[in-house]
Amino acid sequence: MSLPPTTTPSGDETPIRGRDDACPGALRLHPADDGSLARIRVPGGLLTTRQAAVVGRVAEELGDGRLDITSRGNLQVRGLEAGCGAELAARLRTAGLLPSDRHDRVRNVVASPLSGLDGEGYADVTAWVRELDAVLCGGTPAEHGELSGLSGRFLFALDDGRGDVATLGADVTLIATPDGGALLRMAATACRADGAGADRCVVADDVAQRGAGGGGDTPWAVLWVRGGDAPRAAALAAAEFLTRVRESGTRAWRVRELPAQHAVTTEGVAARLAAAGIDAVPQPDAPGPKAPQPPPAPGLVTGPEGRHAVSVAVPLGRADADQWRLLTALASRSGADELRMTPWRGVVLPGLSLGDARDACSALSEAGLVTAPDSPWLGVGACTGRPGCAKSLADVRADTARMVADTERGAGGTARGAAGGERRVGDMARGAAGAVCRAGDTARGAAGAARGAGDTAPGDDRDEPGPGTGTGPDPGLVPEPGPDPEPGPGPGTEPGPGTAPLPVYVSGCERRCGHPGGRWVDALATGDAGYRIAVRGAGRDTPEADSVDVTAEQLAGAVAAARGTT
């Protein structure tokens, strides 16, 4: 199971933004304790093998050699020298990864990663991704407005109808429909006055429960448009948001942050589309996408015409240089000549023959990547920790890798020092990645219970690995937003059939940067070798008195008990 993306905020108050967001980009580097950090936007997670090779060389020659995959399917390079910005930008421009300097940080687009590969869904949305990116970067200001004014947190989601990314809490969502069209949905905030006369705001983006139309009295903006108009309609919807931001006099970063009197409405979006010559039909009772699907499970994905894909998960979302070179080499041998990064910190390699796909699975597993849907790495996440973050009290990634290794051995925390902290996560993953690739339906079934057991949700500002500054939290620099997971079982309960164990997140300090949404097991560092274990989320945190303090070597047993897997 993937970690659940971070959820949206509780919604009790409309955030007051005193300045622009401080999300890093390819041009705006962020100083961290292990060097500068760059975030490279990759719309839809789509990379050509040439682009993947360029990014790999950038990480090796300018950074620390590793690449982080974020909860929005973007990439982060860490360990950059402070003066390398110009060279970094030049390399990315040459590779087509920085098509517009002004729009560097606004190209936040997630898409169904298996679209067009497995026969599911109603459309291949990869074409929508490319067209939307072109509109974002080169749209006519007279029509779309200056979309470079979007914050680095604003998110587009393009769902092929299977329901995997439609639940990620995006600001603008396109959902393919069986008739060749698309539902255009804007996130919304429903506000009312409470007893004290203050506005109380309820975030209304839980598609899984409400459907695409929102239901109830929530002011969703949902319109049907033709498939050929969908990308341009999404850009125009974002332009409508910017108009409402200006009218409100706020600096709202996300649609849900707008004051109630300036909310984006169906009528407002429809009028803007009509002015641009796009027919749009309001859909107040529109159904949602197909029953929400889990993220791609690790393993073989069977597609039409004898082609296959391989889906892998990257432990803790971080690939070392050898792993990235292998992914790039395998992708170059396929007919697709591309790789796709997912909002669940995984990678999909499309366009392979069955034999090549099986060989790729074997090689990727040997390299320490997750290729089996029952790997103990699934559902496990961690913040940056030491040495990247001076606020962290521990090297949480090394401790997490030890925990996973102990879990696979069934040691339950008794194997002291089995995996020393000096070893890389990639090294320790090799024994726990899972050596067997299972084919399509088997893998999908195994992952079915894991819906909502992933990393932070792309919808808000919490899912990318935290930048790890040593100067305290930056209110404008939060891990990238992620999807809103469904609630998991209660603390210490045995998961029933079809129920995923709770995700676990290991944090180096009380900021818990990048933690999952919904219910999750919190492993919080209390010092160099200690952790406090509790169950948090969904308004039902474990009372402090019921938390458990353990050593790093005891993490596996304590976390298994809290997840309900013992």
Image: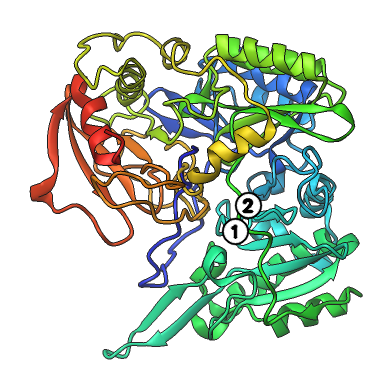
Residue identified by numbered label 1: 170
- For the question of whether residue 57 can be seen, the reply is no
In this rendering, position of residue 283 left or right of residue 542: right
Query: In the displayed structure, would residue 236 be above or below residue 68?
Result: below
Label drawn at residue 157: none
The residue drawn where x is 21% and y is 32% is 558
Give the residue furthest to the left. 545
Residue identified by numbered label 2: 165
Residue 398 occupies quadrant? top left
Task: Give me the C-alpha separation between circle 1 and circle 2.
Answer: 9 Å
Query: In the displayed structure, would residue 182 be above or below residue 423?
Result: below
Task: Kindly identify the amino acid type of the residue bearing the numbered disc 2.
Answer: Val
The residue drawn where x is 79% and y is 21% is 50
Q: Secondary structure at mark 1?
A: loop
Residue 234: image x %, image y %?
75, 63
In this rendering, position of residue 472 left or right of residue 452: left
In this rendering, position of residue 325 left or right of residue 167: right
Residue 289: image x %, image y %?
68, 62
- Please name whichever residue, 478 or 91, is drawn nearer the observer in this view of the structure: 478
Q: Are marks 1 and 2 in contact (CB under 8 Å)?
A: yes
Residue 456: image x %, image y %?
46, 46
The residue drawn where x is 49% and y is 45% is 449
Query: In the displayed structure, would residue 56 be above or below residue 96?
Result: above
